Amino acid sequence: MALDELADWRKSHYTKDITQEFIDKEVILGGWVRNFRDLGGLKFINLQDKYGERQITLKKGVVSDEIFDKAKLGYQYCIMVKGKVKRFDKAPGGIEIIPSKLKILNKTPEKLPIDMTGETNSELDLRLNNRALDLRSLRSQAIFEIRAEVLKSIRNFLLERDFTEITTPKIIGSATEGGTELFPIMYFDKEAFLTQSAQLYKEQLSGVYERVFEISPCFRAEKSRTKRHLCEIFTLDLEMAFADMNDVLKILEEMVHNVIKDIRKNKMPALKILKMDNKTIVPEIPLPRYTYDEILDLITKEFKINVEWGEDISTEAYRKLGEEITGYYYITHWPMLIKPFYIQPSKDPKYSESFDLQMGWLELTSGGTRVHNKEKLIEALEEKGLNPISFESHLNAFGFGMPPHAGFGLGIARWITFLCGLDDIRESVMYPRTPDRLTP
RNA sequence: GCCCACAUAGUGUAGCCCGGUCUAGCAUUCGGGACUGUCACUCCUGCGACGCGGGUUCAAAUCCCGCUGUGGGCGCCA
């Protein structure tokens, strides 16, 4: 059977728009077949679009024979329907569409590569191989609706508080910031790298726009094969001038509080689909604060896990911590030894004005007060064994009245993973990049 | 990078330990049929699989080796 042309048909509404006020009105809906049931003289189509679904009902004798016979549909066929909105109490939402015309715009193979019925759970790797299809599933729709709400809520929250959204280069010339491995690329005839963070640029811009944030990708060339690491990550980077760590702690916990409040207010159906409506709850603020020393005490004395002072906390210890402290909490004042050069040391220089925001066993955010004095920054670079010459252009910005500033970086995907109760970070990214996956 | 595990129809699984009874079971998808209020419709019926290569054995989905793929843990992680 030949497919139909779009021709002059245009969608009049999305499924979510069709409310009781539309009764007896004609609408044109378009989308995909989520479910099709043939009862003989009666057929039901669940048409889904980007927002939800509506039931299309075809009763023999009520709709034309032509359209009734045409309605032989498979999962995820792309269709458009012109029809009248009718009230019917037994229909989902009390509303159904009685079609006068049906267009089949595209078909699918008889057997789809992943389960779209909700009957079985296809493996994540298989789902990712067929991601454009998988993203239409109820579950994926819910995850990305929540992600969209998170991003919207973050932007609203920050813009209302005089933050300026910035964009900084993702292609950089030197790989000297330290820490993680970078992806080298060719920039015409020069070697260049994909950026590991917006750190240096956002600091510079805090000396211009005072309060700045950026939501953008960063790249980590680490062959980390875990359920919480990606090679291309999306981070919220925030920096505030005329502020220190305490101001950042406050604004971050307010933001977390607000975002979850917005999700519960606007995305409750999505939370319910993910069975997180009782788990993703608004945390009380201020969030609990522990110092690194207090956490270390707990780990070594209560959990009997050996972590030396000045070491990072092992995965094993974090997992145990997550069992003990289930919600969001801060760990502050990390040893200067394991923090990057731009972090401000505390009064006792063994410690630093730094913090992590944890959710259970997962690290969500790192941040702190930054060094804003050029001479001290040069000293700090040298102490970390880095060459100030290669930071010349960055240091340059610190010569023109750089204000005291503080900030943080937050892993968006990790947060989505936690908010949606997912098992694997890959599920919270539309097209995740891992050491083993470069397509789709 | 290191260690461990797993691989059965389109999808998800049972069988493997203890070789023969497996002509490989089940659910769903898919094909055919019945059905005018379903919503995971129901019922009848049919098609469809042991990752690849080698070995042991009278006999291999089952035991052994290699390869490939996947999963998990650790490490790395501004």
Image (cartoon, rainbow, N blue to C red):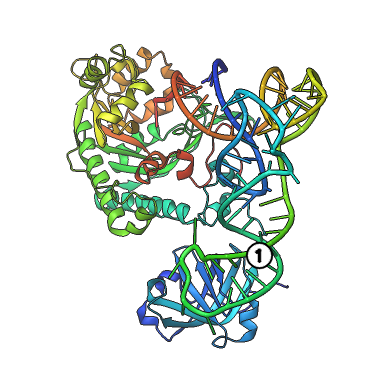
Tell me residue A394's x, y (percent): 40, 28
**Residue at image coords 53%, 57%:** A117
Q: Position of residue A433 (x, y in %)?
A: 54, 38
Q: Position of residue A121 (x, y in %)?
A: 52, 47
Residue closest to the eye, B18 or A59: B18
Q: Which residue is found at the position 46% from the left and 56% from the top?
A: A138
Question: Residue A191 occupies which quadrant of the picture?
Answer: top right
- The answer for which chain carries disc 1 is A
Q: Does residue A237 lie above or below B28 as drawn?
A: above
Report if residue A186 is visible in the image: no
Q: Amino acid at mark 1?
A: Lys
Q: Residues within 10 Å of mark 1 (few under 14, many from 20)?
A: some
Decide if residue A92 is on the left or right side of residue A329: right
Between residues A373 and A55, which one lies in front from this camera angle?
A55
Q: Is residue A304 above or below residue B23?
A: above
Q: As displayed, is residue A392 above or below residue A247?
A: above
Decide if residue A284 is on the left or right side of residue A365.
left
- Quadrant that contains the C terminus of chain A: top right
- A121 or A384, which lies in front? A121
Q: Is residue A405 visible to us here?
A: yes
Q: Which residue is mark 1?
A: A107
Check the picture and name the quadrant holding the N terminus of chain A.
bottom right
**Residue A39 location, quadrant:** bottom right
Q: Disc 1 on helix, strand or loop?
A: loop
Q: Position of residue B65 (x, y in %)?
A: 70, 17
Q: How many marks?
A: 1
